[in-house]
Amino acid sequence: MSDNWIVQNLVNALNTWNEKLAEIWQLLTQSPEQFKDGTIWQVIVNIHDTVRAIGLALLVLFFVVGVVRTCGSLSEIKRPEAALKLFIRFALARGAVVYGLELMMALFTIIQGLISRIMTTAGMGTAGRTVLPSSIVTAIEECGFLESIPLWAVTLLGGLFITVLSFLMILTVYGRFFKLYIYTAIAPVPLSAFAGEPSQQIGKSFLKSYAAVCLEGAVIVLACIIFSLFASSPPAVNPNAAAVTQVWSYVGELLFNMLVLVGTVKLADRVVREMMGL
């Protein structure tokens, strides 16, 4: 790496960005069971098992309320077809509460397979690295003291923005894991709503929301792939322009692409929810 302070500042900011992008790529290929060596997952599973007892109690309550609101009289319940329908609904709702964790992990595995297929199709096993072009390094190193003064301001601001954007992006991806854990922990309660016909919409909304959180990973992967393709073709810089103009043009276009990526990552939840009609 160059000994020039301005070059080092830009390179360090880009290294931070590349490290966070690589960490995001790794996180998106992990399951909640693997995240942080499974320590958090074990606690969440224990909470889920505890909440399951509450879910089973609510299951009976939602079932009774559903029977009262959908059946006009006791004689209607005595009809074989009506009784069979109620029995099947109760059995399926109980299965959703008891085996909800397995069902949710099966859904997560399916979506993870989609994410892996997207990565394979794009031919990217890892996230692309953003590297400072050699022409920019040469232009900076050839600057005199007075010429380098505006470059310090440009690189300080540019490096600061790049570092902030990288942390904003990684926090969003960590937030997705937190949402997965929260949904898993409280799953038995909303799933118990399937026991009653009037309350079944609660369970449907919960499953749709959980699927949306899982699909966020696919949107984030697509955004990272598009950014990596942009980063593989550095912004065109006029070699005859002043060094500060070259650096400003490069940093400005790079920051624009990074802002688009971070914005897409942060809006991934909204994008998926709109796709699913939530």
Image (tube, rainbow, N blue to C red):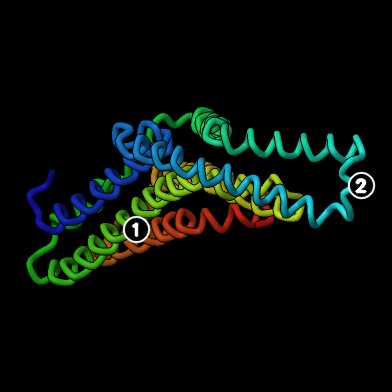
Q: How crowded is mark 2: few (under 14 residues within 10 Å), some or many (20 or more)?
A: few
Residue 133, percent across and down? 28, 47
Q: Is residue 178 above or below residue 147?
A: above
Say left or right for 242 vs 100: left
Kind of residue indicated by mark 1: Leu
Q: Which residue is drawn at 44% across and 54% down?
A: 261
Which callout, 1 or 2, points to the residue nearer the camera?
2
Residue 222 visible within the image:
no
Q: Which residue is drawn at 79% across and 55% down?
A: 68
Provide the residue designation for mark 2.
75
Residue 129 visible within the image:
yes
Q: In this view, does 177 lie above or below 247?
A: above
Q: Residues under labels 1 and 2: Cα distance?
A: 61 Å
Residue 54, percent across and down? 52, 46
Q: Earlier in the sequence, mark 1 or mark 2?
A: 2
Q: Is mark 2 on a helix, strand or loop?
A: helix
> In the image shown, does 185 or 51 lie closer to the viewer?
51
Q: Which residue is drawn at 37% across and 49% down?
A: 174
Q: Is mark 1 on a helix, strand or loop?
A: helix
Provide the residue designation for mark 1.
168
Say left or right for 181 vs 277: left
